[in-house]
Amino acid sequence: MSGTSLDGIDLALCKFSNSYTFDLLNFKTVSYSHKWKKKLESAHHLSGIELRLLEIEYSRYTASFVLELLKETGQNVDFIACHGHTIFHQPENNLTYQMIDGSILAALSGITTVCDFRSGDVALGGQGAPLVPIGDALLFGEYEACLNLGGFANMSYEEAGKRIAYDISPANLLLNELASREGLDYDKNGDLARSGKIIMPLLEKLNSLEFYGAQPPKSLGREWLEEKILPFIKMGTTRDLLATAVAHISDQISHSLNQSAASGKVLVTGGGAHNTYLMECISQKSNLKIEIPSAKIIDAKEAIVFALLGKLRLENKTNILSSVTGASHDSCGGAVHH
């Protein structure tokens, strides 16, 4: 699993039971080098041949870490489920593209590989996102809502017997972009943001973006961030811009939580759950009980769920919910390579 926040490749070795419980046997994140971060964040500007060559290089790069983990653990696995790295996400143009070549992964590992989970849903008129909510329901059903703070923030919850989910706002992708201006990979614990002052005119501008008034299903991609937000966050100190960004993100998240059908516990995972200042702001503004699990589950949850999506795909069971994505019907998504 590689998220839009460009932290690295998450590798989760999971064992599932038929009753949808799981054991996380091993987990690690292989951090991207500066070179790979630059390659991935600029990939959407490449020509067709350049992008294909990068996909081949990235697939071989990913395979090397999968093989390394399997060698370290001595485990035999039934399949590999690989999300790849999102380069384009424009469902309004019938387009979503997660860069990974499953045939290369399968060939180099000798293991059945499932990838390209989103394209089929987009073909059915869906957003192709979020895909994690079926895992929220099956693996983490004791929580009334699940909030993921990755490159973007998204949430899922039950309403009238259906799973509802959508992208809320930018999260780590925006915060890390701002932190990079100080030569940092991220704002540890939100300390820079905590020390800054909110720029109220900017906060009001961000909170009034058209996306926030749209009804779900809805999803976000890097292109949206570059077009709608980054042009407006050039003036001001990094501390003040981070303080404003945290205020904006927590405003949007708390509003979504408070407007949802959930009334009890909310499970918060993803890299943003480590940002103590962001979590304080969300907790202060939300009416729900925020629960943060162990550090391993914070970081591994999304990779665990994609392993589940791969399992469901190989069993020919529904792994994408139309109530979440807006597609014409539920589907079983993913391309299988033997």
Image (cartoon, rainbow, N blue to C red):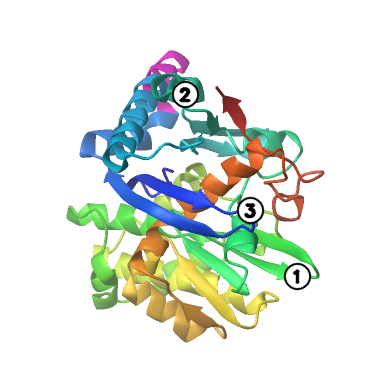
Residue 45 drawn at (x, y percent) = 42, 28
Residue 281 in which image quadrant = bottom left
Query: Which label's residue is closer to the chain start, 1 or 2?
Result: 2
Q: Which residue is mark 2?
A: 106
The residue shown at (47%, 30%) is: 99
x, y percent for residue 303: 46, 49
> Helix or strand or loop: what does disc 3 sit on?
loop
List the residue tagged with mark 3: 18
Question: Of circles 1 and 2, which is in front?
Answer: 2
Please tell me which residue is depicted at 66% across the width and 63% down the height of the picture. Answer: 213
> Mark 1 — residue?
159
- Residue shown at the point (42%, 56%) measured from the top left: 24
In the rendered structure, which amino acid carries the disc numbered 2? Ala
Q: Position of residue 247 (x, y in %)?
A: 42, 73
Q: Which residues are magenta?
A: 45-54
- Disc 1, disc 2: CB below 8 Å? no
Report the Cα–Cα distance between label 3 and label 1.
26 Å
Residue 59 visible? The answer is: yes
Report crowding for label 1: few under 14, some 14 to 19, many 20 or more residues within 10 A (C-alpha): few
Q: Which mark is residue 60?
A: none
> Is 4 colored magenta in this rendering?
no
Q: Nearer the viewer, residue 247 or 86?
A: 86
Label 3 neighbour load within 10 Å: few <14, some 14-19, many 20+? few
Which amino acid type is shown beneath numbered disc 1?
Glu
Residue 51 painted magenta: yes
Give the amino acid at mark 3. Asn
In which quarter of the view is residue 202 placed?
Answer: bottom left
Measuring 35% from the left and 24% from the top, which residue is drawn there?
60
